[in-house]
Amino acid sequence: MPAPVSPGLLNVMAREVAWIRSNRVALLLVFVVPLIAFSILTITFSNAVVRNLNVDIVDRDHSDKSLKFIDTVDASPSVQVARRSSDLNGAMHSVRSGAAIAAVYIPEDFERDIFAAKRPQIVIFYNKQYFTPGNVASSGLQAAIKAATATMPKTPGGSSSFTPGPLVTEQYVLNNPALNYVQFLLRAILPTVLHVLTAIAGGYAVGSEFSSRSARDWLASAGGSPVAALVGKLAPYFGIFILLMVVGLMIIHGLNQIPFRGDAVLMGASACLLVVAYLALGSLLQLLVRNLPAGLSLTAILCSPAFGFAGVGFPVLAMGGFARVWGDMLPLRWYIQILFDQAARGVPTYDSVKPFMVLSALAAGYFGLCWLRLMMIGPNPEQKPKEVRPVTPRAGIVGAFAAEYRRVLSDSGVFGLIVLAPLIYGALYPQPYLGQFIRKIPIAVVDDDSSNVSRQLIQMLDADEATRVAVRPNTLEAAQAALARREVFGIVGIPAGTEREVLKGTQARLPIYADSAYFLLYNRTLQGITESVATVSADLAAGSARENGSLRHASLVKSSPVEILNQPLFNPTGGYASYVVPAAFILILQQTFLMGSAMLSGVAYEQGGRQARRDRGRPSAVLGQALAHLLLVLPGFGLYLIILPRFYGFSANGRLLDMLALAIPFILAVSCLGQFVGAWFKHRETAVLLFVGVSLPLFFQVGVAWPLEAIPNAIRTASLMLPSTLAIDGLVRINQMGAGLADVWVNWQRLWILAGVYAALAMASAWFAGRQANAA
């Protein structure tokens, strides 16, 4: 028989390892849930480059020229011609219903106007509400149309007068030249998922001492030392989550063969600090409230929106004051900066010292607060639990409705998830994105020409809404050093002799270096630079011609005989918040409600055992409970889809009846899903432990942020089992895109089917529990 371990650090560690091995939920939380989330995300982003997005073509000309343009569009790798509508109404229906992400309109007399040098327009209508797929489709269509235009023979005739040479940009994509979405998104999302689970695991480990275990025994096993108690308890989780960090790195750099460019030692130390910080944060919240369900709910509310504040999707430089301050207090924000600087951008180690020091301070600060709080409650670690009178339901639908309503209002954990959490998320989640647009991105200009043309170009770059000239270094090396320090995010080179080439009538090439580590910054920087160069080039070609005069028109025809009009739909200003927040609100509504609904089943089991579980699964009870949930969640639905979009200035079409018709089966489906999965839970906190970590992976299954065409069929089919997949797509199309219920009829039908299936499963689970009770 082994000798007993004396009180101290090792004794606490041995006690915690034994508890993890004996606790099925803890094993699921620290092993199964992270690996499932990693697998879903890895498969979702297995197509690193987006291809074959569906577009609709409206060809009103039916000429050889229009057919040539259509064939070129269909040959583009990023889009494919899926439909051929006869008019714009049909094309708009295709876009609203999801059959196409974009439409191309070729006008009547297109071929004739080309030969007549009238510079006809081809109009691209693309769904800007579905941000990433819409932008990819727009870029692909523009490139295809420009390629078709470039193959056209030069228009005969015209003036023989001198025309200055054009300014032509040569784009050099830095850090992610293939524009690989795995390298951009997956690299950031994996640690984001892991940081939520780390905080939840730390909170569960400490909070369980105030519920199912004994805080006195915990401190006694540490010999009364708060430091030994904390370090010993959290050490096993530290080891587990560091191993999961390694698994994430293997997925990125091994499975996907993405190169690592930076300091591996610094990156490893940063990962250790991230894990320590979030283990400490989750523990601190539990020590403050000493209530496991309430502490876990707080942890979820604080950690779940952290991805937005980390600056991956929407850059920190475009955030408002509150979002920057809040983000600076989150360890994830600094870890992501180190991760991208080292792994993606390969900057020198000393350029990552500042974020590393801030991350170290946050980890030490949160752990220090844990230690102080444990010192304060050490003499009396356990507080007397509040007595909660069990709710005894009456028979029938009305009785189940009333009992469920009282149970929600009397339980702080459930009330916090179903009622309070939507209010908190409604205020907190949109904060990083409220700036909507990225303006005045700093760039560097290396002017080796020092001519009138170069000065005109610099003035135009500085005047553009997207860019500002922040640095004027003398050499490209100095500009690249500024880019490594995040002082600039793009570089424009103006070689010596640029003005001379323009005056000779030949092309003057301008090298453009753009940092693609952050896609939104890259696209916006490139947009501002290319717009400025095109404007200066057009001004030089037109000379002293009037803005709308024939000479300017002739110069435009000579440079491009077909004009491309790029028209964004549904989110015409391209606001980032207008895209991400409406869809995220619906997912938040599902996740908070799902956890609350499942938690109610755990509450009932804690109070009444298997008999209570069986009673909750009677057909009348399932229906009554679902109706109670519907009444409780509808205010949150109104807040997220009616009030807050108008408060924040997002587009909303006000189709209240259509939204309500889709929201009712959505809420009922989530309610029945929660009742079904909750029927297997014996403790109220299990729902939060198992569901909070999968929220971010679910967001990418809908098609709003990541195109459905890029998601493997197996994942797309599996995601249809979740109400959020159908509800987000349908409600965004109704509220933001002006679709009617007929346009999302399939979503409506499938949501009712899900509600019926999950209701039947909830009843079957109760029957199975009844059989277990009778057998016992």
Image: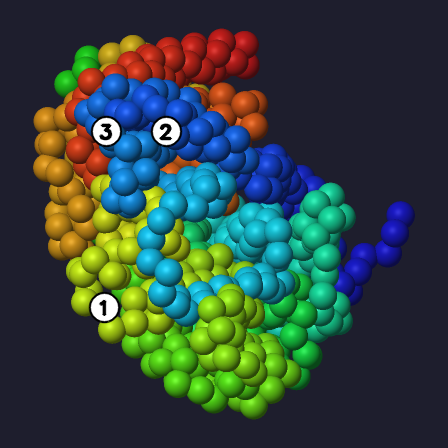
Q: Amino acid at mark 1?
A: Ala
Q: Is residue 556 above or below residue 621?
A: below
Q: Is residue 396 above or below residue 305?
A: above
Closer to the eye: label 2 or 1: 1
Disc 1 on helix, strand or loop?
Answer: loop
Q: Position of residue 638 (x, y in %)?
A: 15, 40
Asked if residue 45 shows in the view, the reply is: yes
Q: Amino acid at mark 2?
A: Ser
Q: Quadrant of residue 45?
A: top right
Distance (Cα) linking label 2 and label 1: 31 Å
Mark closest to the chain's N terminus, 1 or 3: 3
What residue lies at 62% left-to-right and 63% top-to-bottom? 175
Mark closest to the chain's N terminus, 3 or 2: 2
Disc 2 on helix, strand or loop?
Answer: helix
Query: Outermost residue toward the right?
Result: 1
Left or right of 43 on screen, residue 97: left
Q: Position of residue 168 (x, y in %)?
A: 49, 64
- Give the number of the disc on residue 545: 1
> Which quarter of the rendering shows the C terminus?
top right
Disc 3 on helix, strand or loop?
Answer: loop
Q: Amino acid at mark 3?
A: Glu
Q: Which residue is mark 3?
A: 108
Left or right of 351 on screen, residue 207: left
What residue lies at 34% left-to-right and 24% top-to-bottom? 63
Distance (Cα) linking label 1 and label 3: 29 Å
Between 17 and 69, the residue placed more toward the observer is 69
Q: How many marks?
A: 3
Distance (Cα) linking label 3 and label 2: 10 Å
- Give the number of the disc on residue 66: 2
